[in-house]
Image: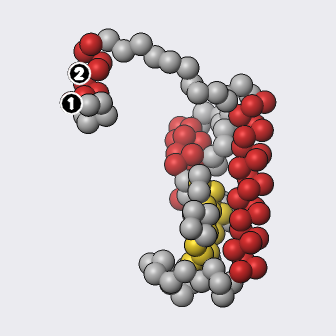
Amino acid sequence: LASLIDLMPTILDIVGIPINEAAQGRSLLPAITEGVRTRRDVHFFYGMKTLEWKYISEGEQLFDLRVDPHEQANVITKSRDVGQAMARELAEHTARRIEERERNGWGGDGGSVELSDEERAQLRALGYLE
């Protein structure tokens, strides 16, 4: 299991630059070079995934990846205990991340940015602005 937040620590590890303690991700280099599993789960904004299960909070969905790797059958009613445990873990993880952001001053709306006419035109050409 890997997440995009693992990319930066992995690249830093490969080139031999120390990884900042505040980095949320983990180096995947041990997984690449030694086959060592570096994560037991991956959290994302609206759910989490382990090797065995995938839980999505929106619409409360749970998939047993061992028998349903293509996530076709929602088994939330059959495996309510697993879904509830994953929902709790996701809520705790989210609360820790929010607390960490506030503690480190990463919260807020990100501020505002003034764009030049050229930058606006570039963003419009890419479909980000109308």
Picture coordinates of residue 102 (x, y %)?
75, 31
Q: Which residue is mark 1?
A: 125
Q: Describe residue 47's horizontal placement relative to residue 127 as left or right.
A: right
Q: Is residue 105 visible?
A: yes
Residue toward you, 23 or 30 = 23
Q: Quarter of the image holding residue 126? A: top left
Q: Quarter of the image holding residue 36? A: bottom right
Q: Which residue is mark 2?
A: 121
Which element type, helix, strand or loop, lies under badge 1? helix
Amino acid type of the residue tagged 1 in the rendering: Ala
Picture coordinates of residue 46 (x, y %)?
59, 57
Q: Is residue 54 visible?
A: no
Q: Are the two marked residues, 1 and 2, in contact with CB atoms closer than 8 angstroms?
A: yes
- Quadrant position of the N terminus in the picture: bottom right
Q: Residue at x 21, y 30 (%)?
A: 125
- Quadrant position of the C terminus in the picture: top left
Picture coordinates of residue 30 (x, y %)?
61, 56
Amino acid type of the residue tagged 2 in the rendering: Ala
